[in-house]
Amino acid sequence: MLNADLNIFKFGGASIKDAASIRNVANILQEYKGQQLVIVVSAMGKTTNALEVVARAYYEGNVELANQRLTELRNATFTTIQELFGETPDNLAAAVNDLFVTIEWVFDDPPSESYDYDYDQIVSLGELISSHIVTAYLRHSGLPSVWLDARDCIITDNTYREGWVQWPETQQRVKQHVTPILEAGSMVVTQGFIGSTTENFTTTLGREGSDYSAAIFSFCLDAGSMSIWKDVPGVLTADPRIFENVTKLDRLSYKEAIEMTYYGASVIHPKTIKPLQNKSIPLHVRSFVTPAEPGTEISSDAGDVYPPMVAVEKEQALVNISTRDFSFVAEHHIRELFEHITTTRLQVNMMQNTAISFNVVVNDIDDRIERFCALIEDDFKTTVDRGLELITIRHYTPEVRESMRRGKVTLLEGRLPLTIQMAVKEVAVIARKEG
């Protein structure tokens, strides 16, 4: 039974990127004063990107660069705090300063053998900082708010950078920590993206995983609804930063939302929808720019007729794999390949096999492709094409398909009844020289 009085709000990095944005969030929440709310926040603005530079520099032994970037982030953070409050509250200054010090202590020791482990301990700082600042400002604005460490609630395995939620323990902990705060009449402010192992090591849930965090809290608390606040009016048929003539969808089914997020639509994290669907919790995608507008509702009540929708994933690579002995690529080969794909945590977005080759389109992250190719080099030959885009069109029409192909060469294409996927590379249009 859903609790119709309880809502989960998620605010991303763009919605709290600076002092003015945080004030805007507080203004939005004033409309919900006295209601039961759990507020999940991302890191501010480009903080995650900055911390990724810190983590990589530290892991590669460049502690000087890591310290320099961390100091720049500290200065920017305290500038935002000063703009919000005028004079920094002592308790907020202490909390934020302590978080930066914990990372400086990390620099005193050599990196671990696992970059993913070090990444999670450092990059998680962003959400912890932003949630402290937002909590303090909400209190400053007269909104009773309690800061909650998501790591006390969301328990994962020890797969760093993409932790798998341990649902039974997470459900028990979420109810234990959140319910008393709500019953006391305060809003809960917590972090997206982060969790913890049972040994209390910080984990993250995957890039842009704050949406998923909000869905976890929604599921565990039987929330009446969940809202994601974005800088767009709702779910659009394509990314307006890339395409013209996009339109807003008023309603979307869970199934359609799952398909689109799986294929790379960036408005919602791919893992977000399923926990909500399992309990029929409606998801609203709303604009923090025009908060009075209804946005898009994702639920089981939406229809099944949609216009063409386009998702684009950048930084893709096509890995072509063939056997060294010229034999067919059989089932036992594919089983072996997927064991290595799992080991190296390649994220496969498209695959296709012929008699003599197996092709996968994957996210080109860190050195994962190189490690995968090294693991299979004794038995397989590989070639890698980088710098690709993966374009997915749901409910495609010939006109939209052809428009997506212009100025590009297609390296791999696959079709399903409602969906077409193309791994493409930009090509210059050949023009005849004059004279």
Image (cartoon, rainbow, N blue to C red):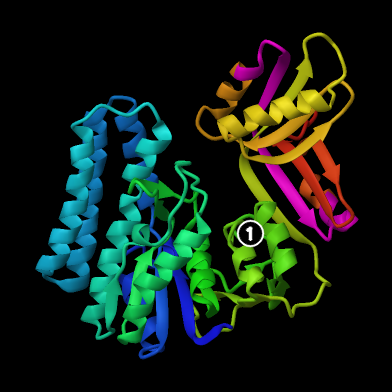
Does residue 427 appear in this view? Answer: no
* Image-quadrant location for residue 240: bottom right
Q: What residue type is labelled 1?
A: Asp
Q: Is residue 156 left or right of residue 182?
A: right
Where is residue 349 drawn, in percent x and y? 69, 42
> Of residues 212 and 221, which is closer to you in this image?
221
Range shown magenta? 375-401
Kindly identify which residue carries mark 1: 239
> Of residues 400 and 121, which is closer to you in this image?
121
Q: Is residue 269 left or right of residue 8?
A: right
* Image-quadrant location for residue 83: bottom left
Question: Which residue corresponds to the image point at 68% horizontal and 53% vertical from the top-left?
Answer: 262
Does residue 281 appear in this view? Answer: yes
Question: Which residue corresponds to the image point at 67% horizontal and 24% vertical from the top-left?
Answer: 384
Question: Which residue corresponds to the image point at 66% horizontal and 29% vertical from the top-left?
Answer: 339
Where is residue 404 drawn, in percent x and y? 77, 49
SS at badge 1: loop
Placement of 301 over or under 369, stated as above or below: below
Where is residue 216 drawn, in percent x and y? 51, 65
